[in-house]
Image (tube, helix red, strand yellow):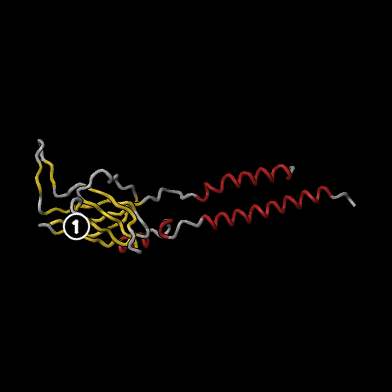
Amino acid sequence: MNCTKILPAVLLLLLLLMPAAAAPLYDTTKAVIVSFHYKDGTVTPVGSRVIYGYPPDNFANRDMLIDIVGKNSAVIGSYGIEDPRIKYTEGSSTERRTDVRFSVILPFAAVGDHVDLYDGQTRQKLATADITVAIAKFCNAHRDDPDCGGGGSPVTLYSAAGILILVMAGAGLYLFLKRRKPPA
């Protein structure tokens, strides 16, 4: 078997497979679900949790606005939702409720601290909900998730692959030089 032809083919194959090996094995997109209770003009946070999945597209409606705020008080993202108090009935009539529970599904942000809920017309803050406990609970249950510090670092993977390539290149150079040496 000719090692000088096999070694470059193996090295090329390793280089091609490295990005695939560094990619997560499953989709790690997450959403934060924040629940509120609206009663007689007062909004109270009820709880929050993190799940795997995609949040809906909350760009079109602006009856209420939601800001995801980071630990440094910077707004990470702003989203709009339809007024949860409005109930659509048969025909084209609507009913405005005074007591309603509702949830908002937002994109996950590992550096998220809290969510601020605003009236879309007046921009008056209606409620603030802490999401740090939900993020910590999720990360504690999913330590292998890349957003929670798990999942294997691509830097470590590339370092290990680099060392393997150097060892194989050294072995190939050794074999090459050994063949070129004239017999004594």
- Extreme residue in the front direction: 122
Kind of residue at disc 1 = Gln
Local crowd size for mark 1, using a 10 Å CA cut-off: few (<14), some (14–19), many (≥20): few
Using the image as rendered, state which of residue 108 and residue 28 is in the foreground.
108
Relative placement, left or right, of 5 versus 83 is right
Residue drawn at point x = 54 percent, y = 58 percent: 156
Residue 118 figure quarter = bottom left
Residue 14, percent from left and from top: 60, 47
Quarter that holds the N terminus: top right
Depicted 143 relative to depicted 57: above or below: below
Residue drawn at point x = 30 percent, y = 64 percent: 133
Residue 92, percent from left and from top: 10, 37
Q: Which residue is mark 1?
A: 124
- Disc 1 secondary structure class: loop
Residue 134, percent from left and from top: 30, 61
Residue 5 figure quarter = top right
Using the image as rendered, state which of residue 64 and residue 106 is in the foreground.
64
Residue drawn at point x = 34 percent, y = 56 percent: 76
Residue drawn at point x = 57 percent, y = 54 percent: 158
Residue 40, percent from left and from top: 10, 57
